[in-house]
Every structure is written in structure tokens, then in C-alpha cells.
Amino acid sequence: MSKLRVLVTVLSSIERTGWVNPFLAQNLITMSHDMRYHVAVEMVVDKFPVDYARNVCISMARERKSEFLLMIDCDQSFESNPLDILSDGLEKDIISLPCMQGYSPSAEHPFIPNFRVLDHPEVDGAFCTVKKAGTGSMFISHRVWEGMRGPWFRWTYLESSELHESVPNAGEDFDFCERARSAGFKVWVHSRAISHWKTSEVTRLGMYTKASQDIARIAGQAGIAMPNAVNWIVREKVAAEGAGR
């Protein structure tokens, strides 16, 4: 039996001075030696704007007849081999590996993940469906680009704006997810958050990493319960639905 072909693309640009964080470099080595798949790694450097860069990734995967594309931004990394997550979700069309998008100690929900939950999420083990998710680290099956016409990613602007102001919460990643769902595909996230080194302080808040003891102490003083994975929001919704049944 031939191995599934996985194209791993790493997006890097002047925004981070072409830098690929060292933890991701180790992840790329691990994936390239994974005997379960035929893995190719490609750097996608200085492709602008970001929606064009992501479309380049899908075009590369399509031209190479890859079964899966894994897009990774150069400031993200994983605690373990992300292909293990793919092995558990081969039948899923889109899998986002979520990270922290922001942190606001004064907000009702201070930890802001880079996805938006559904009112009634579907849960499958460590996976759950979402409305839309960020593409900093995302698996996309060939079924998606075969079932959707390109461009798959596009930045959305306000029609009334003379300065090309973007629509709030309608970046190329969220727009892609919404159109993919309209085309009949499900968008899933895995329950474990990954490191986002552009916002490393936020990552530590969300993942109990290096600063976990001090963060937990400060959060406890503020009456904030610390999550250890992204699935805290989904868990609350599922519990609430169960209580209502």
C-alpha cells in the first residue's frame, strides 16, 4: 500500500525577518522522518499578501497530488509530532491546531483562542467542530481543494471603505472556514493548544508552560480558572447541553 502524501508548507516573511523558530525546526525534522507518510517540506517565503501565500500552498499541494496539506506559520510549534493528530483524523477534511490569539485580564473570557465555537459542536474524541478557526497550523485534505473552486483564501474588505479596511473577524482564515462549511465540509479543532511564539506570553497563559506557576498564582488572585487545553470552551458548551437534556 502506498503511503499518503503530505505536503508541509512553512510560511515565513519579512514580518518575522524570515525566522523559523527552533522548536518548529525540530518538528519539521521529526515529520520528515515519519515512516507512515511520504512527507515533503517546503518553505513559502515572502509571498504577499497572506491570502495569496496560502493559495500558493494549496496550489503546490494540488500540483504534487498530495492527500493532505499542513500549513504552518513560522512562529508556531508543537509539543509532539503533529502527524499523530492527522493519523487520528484522516477522515476529517479540515483540522486546525489551535493557539492563543489574545489575552485580556479584564475581559469576561480572558483567554482568547483563534477559533469560534458552534452553538452545538460535534465532539469526536479529542476533536470538535467549530464555526471557524485560524490557519496558523492547519491540515487540509485534498477533498477540500477538489470540492471548492479557488481562490480558496481571500481577504475580505468593507465595500464602503475607500482605504480597503478589512471586515472585522473576516480575515482569509475565517473566510475560508465559512466558505468551506457552506460547501459541506466540517472544520475541526484538536483539543490541545500549540505554541504561538509571536504571542509567547499568551501561549504560556494557555498551556501551563514555562511561566505556569507565576501565571496560575496571579490568575488565582483574580479568580480566574486556568485551562490546560483549548477544549475548555467546548467542554462548557457540551456540559450545558447535557444539563438541558
Image (tube, rainbow, N blue to C red):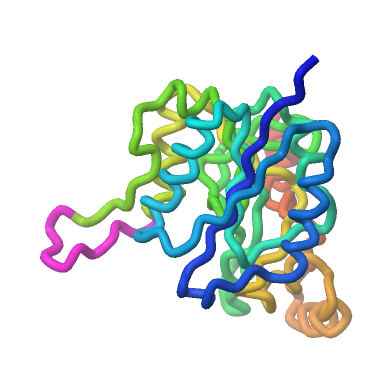
Quadrant where the C terminus is found in the figure: top right
Q: Is residue 192 magenta?
A: no
Give the x, y percent position of residue 58: 48, 39
Give the x, y percent position of residue 106: 58, 78
Q: What is the total number of numbered labels drawn onto the structure image?
A: 0
Q: Nearer the viewer, residue 75 or 114?
A: 75
Q: Is residue 50 left or right of residue 191?
A: left
Give the x, y percent position of residue 221: 79, 84
Q: Identify the residue shown where x is 50% and y is 27%.
A: 144
Q: Is residue 127 above or below residue 24?
A: above
Q: Is residue 93 left or right of residue 88?
A: left
Q: Identify the residue shown where x is 77% and y is 66%.
A: 23
Give the x, y percent position of residue 142: 55, 26
The quadrant where residue 225 appears: bottom right
Q: Identify the residue shown where x is 57% and y is 36%.
A: 140
Quadrant where the N terminus is found in the figure: top right
Task: Look at the image and give the residue range highlighted in magenta.
Answer: 159-169
Q: Is residue 205 above or below residue 42?
A: below
Q: Identify the residue shown where x is 62% and y is 74%.
A: 199
Q: Is residue 164 magenta?
A: yes
Q: Is residue 66 left or right of residue 52?
A: right
Tell me which secondary structure the magenta stretch mostly adopts: loop
Q: Nearer the viewer, residue 213 or 7?
A: 7
The quadrant where residue 59 appears: top left
Residue at the extreme top: 1
